[in-house]
Amino acid sequence: MPDSPDKDPVISQSLAVYLLISSVLLLLTLWWSLYDEFFGLRPWKDYQRAFVQRYGAFLRKQIPLQRAKEKAIENSPDYLALKQKLEAMEKETAPKVTELDAKSAQVDARTAAVLNLLTTARAYVGSQIYIIEHTSSRGSKQSLQKDLDAYERGPFQVSLPPAQLGGNEEALRVTFDQLEGKFTELQKEKGDLLLEKASLLHPVSELQNQVDSYVKDHIDGLTVEALQGLQKKNADFEVEIKQINNPDAGIVDRCESCHVGIREPVVMTRKDMGGTKDPMSAAFASHPDPDLLTIHDPDKYGCTPCHNGNGMDIARVEKAHGHDEHWLWPLHPMANVEAGCQQCHASDMVVDHAPTLSQGKQLFEWRGCMGCHVYQGYDAEPEELLSTQRTIE
């Protein structure tokens, strides 16, 4: 008899258990992949959603505080005196302004009457001049010119409204040139009235600007109107990657995808945005020196040229801050944050907004360190003189 064949596992036993385990593992892998793709690798979404809630709550608290401050300023003696002065000036100039407006209205009515006739006359004269210039026959040209001269002599009859209130209408019989002259005269008269009115209202306008900007200039922080504008912007906030791209400088930064509050015009501390123990609150706090952002526009410079870190990575906080064994430029710690200024301002003895760095440069010079410890860019003049001398030799 032939040898009995080995048992075939497919036939001799069920594979249901193995298939079930494999299917469960595949489903778990799929679930983990989807979670990591849409949530695990996108922590900035949670940051932005949390920022919208906390920032909205912060603004709601600020509005009543600022409204109380505005009310106190509006009730201050200086503001009330300024407003009273404005009311007195407006009352004083009102009769003269009314008079000038009435004169301007009369001039407009007279100008309109002249312009109605002048528009038709100008159109006819222009068309006749075109025909004369394009007529080849000398006799026809002379005949047309004679007719045009007769037309321009007129007389043109126009009835003008009275120049003053209670006056009589003025009937004119003028030539074409006189009609144009009258129109120019009325335009000049209207211009003189407008200049007189502007001169009269200039002090009132300046005082009105002072009243309008008094609260804004004297309040500590933003006005209620500005805060309400920030509220609307926050309500329309879109959860998305916030990227700074400057191809000329080779900068691609996505830092503001998590540090969403850096450029907000209100001052927010960690305490305001969740407390010092909450890791998100540090990302939502305002920039410690907002004036730096006015001279180093983030849209132009980005964040990493000053702070280091890996601004392109937004999947992990540690990697985004450059705390990775393969990244050469980790984020500057807070104690050494001014080191970022040195990267561009190495040759500047005094660096604005960097007092520690400036003091170090002064010590470096005062202690005579540069005698032995020379670094590129510092005290470059002697090096340039020596290089030029060697070139001459």
Image (tube, grey):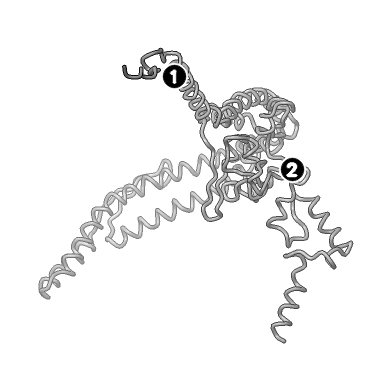
Residue 88 at x, y = what percent? 65, 36
Question: In 3D space, how far apart are the residues under numbered discs 2 and 1 (Cα atoms)?
Answer: 48 Å
The C terminus sits in image quarter: bottom right
Quadrant where the N terminus is found in the figure: top left
When asked about the image quadrant of residue 69, the answer is top right
Q: Is residue 16 above or below residue 314?
A: above
The reply to whether dot 2 and dot 1 touch (C-beta < 8 Å) is no
Judge by depth and name the residue closer to the eye, 235 or 322.
Answer: 322
Q: Is residue 71 visible?
A: no
**Mark sitting on residue 333:** 2
259 to 141, vertically: above or below: above
Tell me if 239 is positioned left or right of 155 in this view.
right
* Residue most extreme to the right: 367
User: At label 2, which amino acid type do we have?
Assistant: Pro
Residue 183 in view of the camera? yes
Q: Indicate which disc residue 321 carries.
A: none
The residue tagged 1 is 23
Residue 162 vertical position relative to residue 20 in the rendered view, above or below? below
Q: Position of residue 41 (x, y in %)?
A: 55, 32
Looking at the picture, which amino acid does disc 1 mark?
Ser
Which residue occupies 72% across, 74% down?
384
